[in-house]
Image (cartoon, helix red, strand yellow):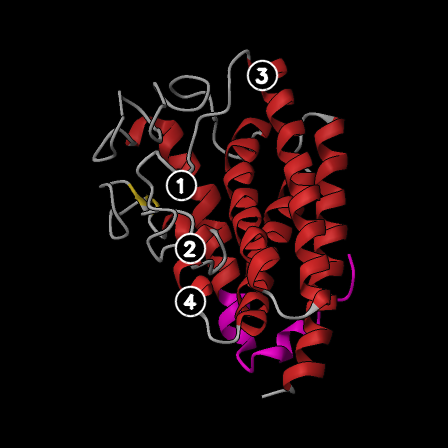
Amino acid sequence: MANIEPRRRVFGRPALLLATGGIIAVSLWAGTRCLSQGMGGAGMPGYEGGAGMPGYRGGVGGPGQMGMGYSDQQFVVMMIPHHDGAIAMADLALTRAQRPEIKALAKSIKASQTRENAQMRAWYEQWYGKDVPSWGPGTGWGWQNGMGMGGGMGMGGGMGGGMGMGMGMGQMGGGTNLSALSAAPDFDRAFIEQMIPHHQMGVMMASMAQTNSQHPELRQLQQAMVRVQSDEIQQMSQWYRSWYGTR
């Protein structure tokens, strides 16, 4: 993995960014474990028993099939909406960014993560015989509501919903806030400040998954995610120091 130490000095709050990333990662995997043990089913629109999101019927792959830890199935289900958040940010940058460097990066992020999403969807259908459950716009998760990637995944149906993904999909998005980004007076600066923690979350998710992935082709994709997004983090950090200085 590329050295990403510089990014921890960009914002002057390294402990917050790294600690938040660690908490999110633990919540992410712990949440799916709790859901797989039949603790879900409460408070989410579209639930029909078990663990789910809108459109789920009995959780990922049916009740209890997520097991006690990681699965490729849950990785795909969670990485696709995470990618969708980055794509949405990139779309904003293509119209609002002032610097050509940001526009070029946004174009690259959109192209690569759109391609990865298509590949993961194809694998999911091939491996599990169904489409990836939808978490995006139009499913009631509040993509544009200032939570970025969603309105919360607590077991009680909200941010404070107890066990499971109590931090919410907005938190899994690594700090994404599309409403704030869209209205930011200095868009380029806000884009970097949001995309770096978003990428940090993606790197953490893919890094954790690599050692347990059951499919070698997905493992290769996870390795590529770590490599590419780590390089992008380093590049954005360098730009931030050059354009805005350290603080």
Residue 14 horizontal/vertical position (percent): 56, 76
Cβ atoms at labels 1 and 3 below 8 Å apart: no
**Taking 89 as reference, is 157 left or right?**
left
Spatial CA distance of label 2 from label 4 is 20 Å
| Mark earlier in primary sequence (2, 4) | 2
Q: Nearer the viewer, residue 41 or 202?
A: 202
Kindly state the secondary structure of the residue where label 2 is placed.
helix
Task: Check disc 3 and give the amino acid type.
Answer: Glu
The span shown in magenta is: 1-19
Residue assigned mark 1? 31
Q: In the displayed image of the protein, which residue is found farthest to the top? A: 129
| Mark earlier in primary sequence (1, 3) | 1
Residue 151 seen from this side = yes
Q: Nearer the viewer, residue 176 or 26?
A: 176
> Mark number for residue 171?
2
Residue 165 horizontal/vertical position (percent): 37, 45
Task: Check disc 4 and give the amino acid type.
Answer: Ala
Kindly state the secondary structure of the residue where label 4 is placed.
helix
Spatial CA distance of label 1 from label 2 is 13 Å
Residue assigned mark 4? 183
Q: Residue at x 46, y 61 (%)?
A: 175
Residue assigned mark 3? 125
Choose top left, top right, bottom left or bottom right for residue 140. top left
| In the image, residue 12 above or below residue 68 | below
Residue 23 horizontal/vertical position (percent): 46, 58
Kindly state the secondary structure of the residue where label 1 is placed.
helix
Task: Check disc 2 and give the amino acid type.
Answer: Gln
